[in-house]
Amino acid sequence: VQLQASGGGLVQAGGSLRLSCVASGRTFSNYIMGWFRQAPGKEHEFVAAIGSSAGRTYYAAFVKGRFTVSRDNAKNTVYLQMNNLNPEDTAVYYCAAGLYYGLVTNRAGYDYWGQGTLVTVSS
């Protein structure tokens, strides 16, 4: 699976962005799709994920209802709608594809990764 993330940019605190990740190469609908992020000087951390049939979603606690993950299997695309952004959300955001529901929030559960898209939130 090849993944291409986009949609990052510079936004003011309180603003919104929608990230997209387009997949190609294998049957997209078979995969759990996850979003992770890495802030400067910090480790990768789980943000959100959505099951293969889009019936179940998973979120990190810090999302607190601000982010929504969704997918369109007909377009081979997963989205991350981010609202009420704050400077602590500044990071490179990565999409990933995996098959292991037991490792949804863990990087080890994902076999394929996109290149990342930078989100910068100014105060």
Image (cartoon, grey):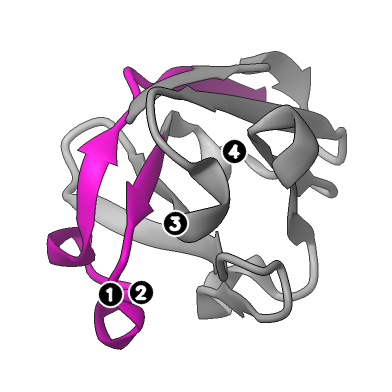
Distance from Cα at disc 1 to Cα at disc 4: 32 Å
Label 4 vs label 3, nearer the camera: 3
Distance from Cα at disc 2 to Cα at disc 1: 6 Å
The numbered dot on residue 104 is 2
The percent coordinates of residue 8 (x first, y second) are 62, 17
**Earlier-in-chain disc, 2 versus 3:** 3
Q: What residue do we see at 12% from left, 63% from top?
A: 108
Q: What stretch of residues is rendered in magenta?
A: 95-123
Indicate the amino acid at tag 4: Pro
Indicate the amino acid at tag 3: Tyr
Indicate the amino acid at tag 1: Tyr
* Residue that protrudes farthest toward the front in the picture: 27
The numbered dot on residue 100 is 1
In the image, 43 versus 106, the foreground residue is 106
Disc 2 and disc 3 in contact, CB within 8 angstroms? no
Distance from Cα at disc 4 to Cα at disc 3: 31 Å
Asked whether the viewer can see residue 88, the reply is no
**Earlier-in-chain disc, 4 versus 3:** 3
Disc 2 and disc 1 in contact, CB within 8 angstroms? yes
Distance from Cα at disc 2 to Cα at disc 4: 26 Å
Distance from Cα at disc 3 to Cα at disc 1: 9 Å
Vertical placement of 87 versus 33: above or below? above
User: Dot 1, how many residues are within 10 Å of its Cα: few (below 14), some (14-19), or many (20+)?
Assistant: some
Vertical placement of 77 versus 116: above or below? below
